[in-house]
Amino acid sequence: MRGLVSVLIPAAIVIGAAAPDLAEVQGALPGGKKAAVRLQFKMGVSVSSKNLPKDFIAKKGDLPRWLSFEDLTSGGKRWALTALFPKDKWGKDEVRHVVRWPKLESVWLISALFCGHGQRYDLLMAANPKNPEFFSEGDIWHIPKALLSPEFGGAATSAPARSQPEDEFDDEARIEASRAMLEYKKDKQGSYAAYRMRKGEALYSGVVMRFTDLVDAKEVNQLAARIAKRSGIKDVRSIQPGQVIKIPLDCLADPFQPEGSKGLAEDRQVRAEVRRTAKVEAGPRLAGVRVVLDPGHGGVDSGARANGVWESDFVYDITMRVRRLLELNTDARVSTTLRYEGIGFGIRDSIPAMTKEAVLLTTPPIPNDGESSSTGSSVHLRWILANHFFATPKTADPRKTIFISFHADSLHPSTRGSMVYVPASNMVPSKFTWAEKGVQVSELKHGASVNFTARQKLEMEARSLIFAEGLLKELRREKLPIHANRPIRNVINRSGKTFVPAVIRTNNAMTKALIEVVNLQNEEDAALLKDANFREQYAKAVVRAIRGHFKNG
Ligand SMILES: [Zn+2]
């Protein structure tokens, strides 16, 4: 059938039109013969070695049936690109690329093919400020000579520092890509970071949620209004692509602070620590690993509520599912900070009503009823209890300790997906003792006083960040929603204060995270949390992330 079609249509034809992950064309070769060129989702370009002239092939030795793009000479590459994208114009100063297969192409891929490496995608985005990040057929992408691979006569120099496929993007690469879109400038009103709005973006999410540490819906809106005014925008609904947004420097999160700033230096110190940090080897089936799970609310404290769901019972169920899976499949020692009387450590497929009775598992247990201890004390007792667990037995290796607190967020309804908080090392005190009159539990004796060296704080943030990254990878693999703008954060800014949530701030676990599973204000997210299949899927991803955190997990 294919032969027949190519007789009828001698130019390039698409056979993969029905298969969303593959496109194939027959490219005309110099001698009159043809060779197939394929574009595959996440696999890139390959060319049939049959009929291909020698001067198109860079690979030595036996030729496979399909040659990868990297196996071609610059002449071969140029030919393959022309066959795939016949509408592209190769001009003197730029290549004008016309998107042909929006489902197969991405900024990363175009950068890999034309600029020599996918990692240049942020520069390519900066060179096309008005284009949306997601492709539509016929979109024009300008690839200036400065970014074009030297193989095509371009000026792209120096190999990028890191090399990884697009979906393996880590937190650092994502942050770097966002940072590359900022320019630091000054006007009469002071210093600011300039950001050019892209098509389809809103100040709310594209700027405030991405570049600052604010998350509270009202505060994000207020700052968006302030930034609009600072940028001379009268009507936020009429912002055009390319519009310059002036973000005052004092609003920027640490990784977006200008060169030479303390915030940026501290952020880079953590990134360097992440690169230095090696996985720790656990015993078989995670033997020797100590996991403490904290269902974020409970008892009288329902947590956030919206769209017919509430935090406490639903995150309790996820916590119990994680607990069950760890107990079934590993030899890790697992403890929880809180138990629902009546339900115990069981899991539930349906959660019809709010459970009012929960106890903190201290000695003696304290009902989470708002009277035996306040909600504020309850948060502190959770990390104190965790510190007690980590110290038992005494021989436990601190690098094999993990603490996870489960929550669900209450953000602007337009945002959705998981966010993970890790403790910013510069916000963790070197010494801290918690004491409150009227609370008497034996764990206070050993768990309530902590000391951290600067070295420990840094290692804790790095290991926690690595765990958070591993968790996002697992969630992505399951196609579960992840917050679109900086899903991993190390501080929260609320009511003018920047802080690390107490439950992970003075917790002795070497790896710790507070997970906001979903955003309850978002209807789709709320519906997911209600679904027992989602809760099970989420728990499985968490367990895989815990296992993956260790060398032989
Ligand atoms: Zn919460």
Image (cartoon, rainbow, N blue to C red):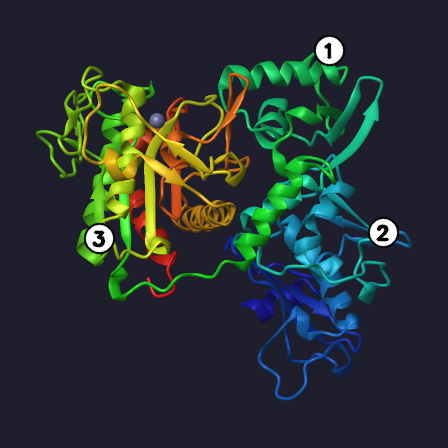
First in residue order: circle 2 vs circle 3: 2
Helix, strand or loop at label 1? It is loop
Q: Position of residue 19 (x, y in %)?
A: 50, 56
Task: Give the number of the mark in front: 2 or 1.
Answer: 1
**Is residue 243 something one can see in this rendering?**
no
Distance from disc 2 to disc 1, alpha carbons, whole Å, reads 36 Å
Q: Is mark 2 within 8 Å of ligand 1?
A: no
Q: Which residue is mark 2?
A: 94
Amino acid type of the residue tagged 1 in the rendering:
Lys
Find residue 15 and report its image quarter: bottom right
Find residue 280 and report its image quarter: bottom left
Amino acid type of the residue tagged 3 in the rendering:
Pro
Q: Position of residue 212 (x, y in %)?
A: 60, 28
First in residue order: circle 1 vs circle 3: 1
**Is residue 330 something one can see in this rendering?**
yes
Relative height, residue 68 to residue 264 (above, below): below
- Residue extending furthest toward the top: 234
Q: Where, quadrant-wise, is the N terminus in this rendering?
A: bottom right
Q: Which residue is mark 1?
A: 234
Q: Which mark is residue 393?
A: 3
Find residue 342 and report its image quarter: top left
Q: Position of residue 73 (x, y in %)?
A: 75, 74
Q: Residue at x 75, y 18 (%)?
A: 231
Amino acid type of the residue tagged 2 in the rendering:
Glu
Helix, strand or loop at label 2? It is strand
